[in-house]
């Protein structure tokens, strides 16, 4: 009954989405306030109904209701409760339902917090949001319905893919979708503005919090996904240039560009057309990502059961939305007025350069991801484009961008002075140079490239701090005055510095891991020791362990320091999940400072030993900590005063709209 | 410079940048993309020495042999031809006889494929897509994922 309620709620949600697609839009065209006002309540109700549908599916999972095909295929009564719940979206149907839930959630947010938007803009945004919602609800109901019953009901489920039975599934997909789908709001704002034919600096201010929020979640989702793959797959890698990783990375690159170009539009009223285009492209890349992942056209760890009708359906949605919005853009872009002028050497110029690098990088990733599909369609040859391609193209594109980042925030608007900025960055440059020398001297066998890489990371971190030091005049005024000035800086300045610092931290982690990682594959017997990166790993022995829905062979190791002192214990396991008889490797990870020891097991040998793969990964956690810092940076920026007090709100309803409503 | 000249120089700069990026991308695609072959196709393929390729198929039953330390040899078959593979390292969890795998590496002069990575996909029902497509084309594909009650 619960399941049917959920199914019915989802159908109702589709009906409401259709209403939302049309009525507010007609209201905006005919200037009918009553029609426009329907958008808000309908969007909120649509979210509530999708929420009921989603809750019904979660209930079916929690109760292990195997009469539901989706639950039978992806759950098991012996599965721990956490994985019963998270298993809801550990499959195609459930994850699409989560996608739609988050889409309607954002629609409802616009309805609730969009009170200070001009009525026509708000109505148009909600309508565009309704189009997307209707398309995907139709997709779920017709091709990916999670509420289909089985007759007769099986006694036991087939269990969730063991790889997904991890707390990562609770965090990674929801965060990623909040990011992916969050950009739909930017898209809706862009299309709504094009329908209206009116775009000004205020538009950029209204879109900014949505871009920031989506970017924050996407950053977190990608970082979390990377860490999950790192510890779960047992390969010790943090990024594989897997097509599905690329699918989430492309919107991130475009979204980062959007975040920056919107600043220019807001402050200087320039780059309007470009910003609108970026908003459309960012969500288009999100849609493309959804298509690549869900259609199964690409080989990937994320490819759930594949079904060609789904691929064709999403492709149709893709063509309709991307084609439609770009056509509208082509039609209207000419009528938008060009904005303020600026010198190439200026803050605007720096942001344009940032956009040029980021969008080109996104295009490179796009080419690398789609090229195999194209080649197979045209010549029938099957090729793969992997890390070597991306290292050769993406790397050289990112390098100058990373080097230039510290300059951007220090340049003045309209016309900047590179020499003055360079002078102010002297200390940061000196620090980076010291880091390069220290790396060359202290780290054994450090290559010049590795040292320079470390230097770049340190340069970015110090460069970001320089901005704060300069703006608070630290060192030239008394400490208390500087501290007060620092606290008084706009939150967005803190956010910028923190985000750039986080990027530097990530770069430092990547460089350190790639350059100084030590790897060792060997056969060990209980009691034997192996040297790794100046430390000793002793194999204590193996013991069998019985888990709730798996059995495992657990190997215990002790890590000893150079002096023989004990640094810690690591256990690594080979697990077999009973329901699917599927083996997995549970890597053992010991964190020491920012570095990690990573142990994964291979097969046992005939003479009682076991193949062991050991990595020493120096500073590897910085990769994800940097991502975390970027998330915090976006959150800090979201609390900026100017985002809370919108321009129209200041005039009309400053008293009635509570502060912080946009957060 | 006039406003128009300024704008033109910016556009020219951006275009030069994009041109360089495009050239680099296509150069990299030519150099770094690796082709996928099944054993039968490999027989007909013309490879340059040291060219990286991906070899896909099923692990032939009875061919998996462990050598010194972590050396492993096995054969990849498409039920018509088979190719011997040499690999050093840890095999993926789902590597077993009869399982679909993709090996990445280079063809040695002695006809042995030297793999530096071996992939088996994560689901016991899941075949690497290239392998599944090729097997279906040859008519030796078996679908194991039928539902009960439907």
Image: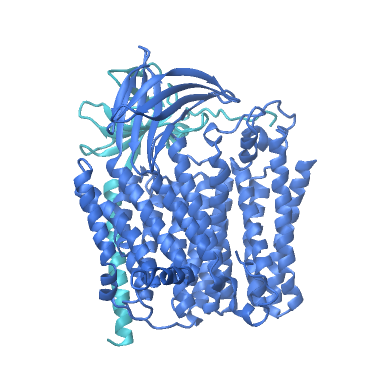
Chain colours: A blue, B cyan
Residue at 51 percent of width and 32 percent of height: B123
Work out whether A573 lies above or below A326. Answer: above
Return the x and y of residue A300 as percentages of the image width and height: 46, 41
- Quadrant of the rendered structure where residue B27 is? bottom left
Q: Is residue B78 left or right of residue A182?
A: left
- Quadrant of the snapshot with the N terminus of chain B: bottom left
> As drawn, which residue projects farthest toward the top?
A607
- Can see residue B85? no
Nearest the eye: B136 or A587: A587
- Can see residue A64? yes
Return the x and y of residue A657 as percentages of the image width and height: 68, 73
Residue at 70 percent of width and 36 percent of height: A62
Q: Is residue A17 left or right of residue A259?
A: right
Nearest the eye: A395 or A288: A395
Return the x and y of residue A597 as percentages of the image width and height: 37, 34
Counting labels gives 0
> As drawn, which residue projects farthest toward the right?
A1
- Quadrant of the snapshot with the C terminus of chain B: top right
Work out whether A135 lies above or below A520. Answer: below
Work out whether A71 lies above or below A579. Answer: below
Residue at 32 percent of width and 68 percent of height: A407
Return the x and y of residue A200 as percentages of the image width and height: 53, 79
- Quadrant of the rendered structure where residue A608 is? top left
Work out whether B131 lies above or below A136. Answer: above
């Amino acid at each position: 009954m619960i399941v049917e309620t959920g199914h019915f709620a989802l159908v109702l949600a589709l009906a409401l989405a259709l209403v939302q697609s049309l009525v507010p839009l007609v209201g905006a065209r005919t200037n009918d306030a009553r029609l426009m006002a329907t958008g808000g309540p309908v969007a909120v109700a649509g979210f509530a109904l999708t929420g009921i549908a989603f809750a019904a599916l979660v209930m079916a999972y929690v109760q292990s209701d195997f009469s539901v095909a989706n639950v039978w295929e992806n759950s098991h009564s012996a599965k721990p409760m956490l994985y019963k719940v998270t298993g809801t979206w550990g499959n195609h149907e459930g994850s699409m339902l989560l996608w739609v839930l988050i889409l309607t959630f954002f629609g409802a947010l616009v309805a609730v917090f969009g009170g200070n938007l001009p009525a026509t803009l708000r109505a148009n945004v909600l309508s565009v949001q309704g189009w997307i919602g209707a398309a995907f609800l139709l997709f779920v109901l017709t091709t990916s319905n999670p509420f289909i019953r089985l007759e007769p009901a099986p006694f036991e489920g087939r269990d969730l893919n063991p790889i997904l039975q991890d707390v990562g599934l609770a965090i990674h997909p929801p965060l990623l979708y909040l990011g992916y789908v969050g950009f739909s709001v930017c898209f809706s704002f862009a299309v709504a503005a094009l329908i209206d034919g009116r775009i000004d600096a205020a538009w950029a201010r209204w879109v900014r919090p949505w871009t920031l929020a989506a970017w924050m979640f996407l950053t977190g989702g990608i970082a979390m996904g990377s860490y999950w793959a790192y510890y779960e797959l047992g390969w010790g890698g943090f990024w594989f240039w897997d097509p599905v990783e690329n699918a989430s990375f492309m919107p991130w690159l475009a979204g980062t560009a959007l975040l920056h170009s919107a600043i220019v539009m807001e402050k200087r009223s320039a780059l309007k057309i470009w910003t609108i285009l970026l908003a459309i492209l960012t969500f288009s890349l999100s849609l493309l990502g959804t298509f690549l992942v869900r259609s199964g056209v690409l080989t990937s760890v994320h490819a759930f059961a594949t079904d060609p009708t789904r691929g064709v359906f999403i492709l149709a949605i893709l063509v309709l939305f991307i084609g439609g919005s770009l056509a509208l853009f082509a039609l209207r872009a000419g009528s938008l007025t060009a904005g303020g002028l600026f010198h190439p050497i200026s803050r605007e110029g720096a942001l344009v350069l940032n956009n040029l690098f980021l969008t080109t990088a996104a295009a490179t990733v796009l080419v690398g991801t789609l090229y195999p599909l194209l080649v197979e369609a045209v010549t029938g040859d099957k090729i793969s484009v992997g890390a070597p391609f991306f290292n050769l193209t993406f790397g050289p594109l990112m390098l100058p961008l990373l080097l230039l980042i510290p300059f951007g925030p220090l340049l003045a608007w309209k016309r900047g002075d590179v020499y003055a900025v360079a002078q102010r960055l002297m200390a940061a440059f000196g620090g980076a140079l010291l880091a390069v020398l220290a790396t060359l001297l202290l780290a054994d066998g450090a290559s010049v490239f590795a040292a320079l890489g470390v230097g770049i990371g340190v340069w970015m971190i110090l460069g970001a701090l320089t901005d704060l030091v300069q703006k608070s005049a630290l060192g030239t005024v008394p400490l208390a005055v500087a501290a007060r000035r620092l606290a008084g800086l706009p939150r967005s300045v803190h956010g910028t510095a923190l985000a750039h610092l986080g990027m530097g931290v990530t770069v430092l982690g990547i460089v350190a891991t790639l350059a100084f990682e030590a790897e060792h594959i060997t056969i060990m017997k209980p009691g034997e020791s192996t040297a790794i990166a100046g430390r000793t790993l002793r194999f204590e022995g193996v013991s069998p362990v019985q888990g709730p829905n798996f059995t495992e062979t657990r190997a215990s190791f002790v890590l000893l320091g150079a002096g023989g002192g004990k640094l810690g214990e690591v256990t690594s396991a080979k697990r077999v999940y009973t329901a699917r008889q599927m083996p997995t490797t549970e890597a053992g990870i010991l964190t020491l400072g920012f570095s990690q020891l990573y142990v994964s097991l291979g097969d046992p040998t005939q003479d009682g030993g076991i193949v062991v793969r050991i990595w020493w990964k120096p500073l590897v956690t910085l990769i994800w900590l940097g991502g975390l810092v970027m998330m915090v940076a976006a959150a800090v920026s979201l609390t900026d005063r100017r985002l809370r007090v919108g321009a129209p709100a200041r005039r009309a309803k400053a008293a009635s709209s509570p502060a912080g409503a946009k957060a | 410079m006039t406003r128009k000249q300024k704008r033109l120089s910016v556009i020219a700069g951006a275009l030069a940048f994009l041109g360089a990026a495009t050239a680099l991308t296509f150069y990299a695609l030519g150099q770094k993309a690796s082709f996928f072959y099944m054993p039968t196709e490999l027989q007909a393929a013309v490879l340059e020495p040291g060219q990286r390729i991906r070899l896909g198929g099923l692990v032939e039953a009875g061919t998996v042999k462990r050598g010194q330390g972590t050396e492993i040899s096995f054969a990849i078959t498409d039920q018509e031809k088979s190719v011997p593979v040499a690999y050093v390292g840890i095999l993926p969890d789902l590597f077993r006889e009869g399982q679909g795998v993709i090996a990445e590496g280079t063809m040695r002069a002695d006809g042995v494929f030297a793999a530096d990575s071996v992939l088996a996909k994560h689901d016991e029902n899941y075949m690497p897509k290239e392998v599944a497509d090729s097997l279906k084309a040859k008519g030796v594909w078996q679908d194991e994922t039928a539902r009960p009650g439907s």
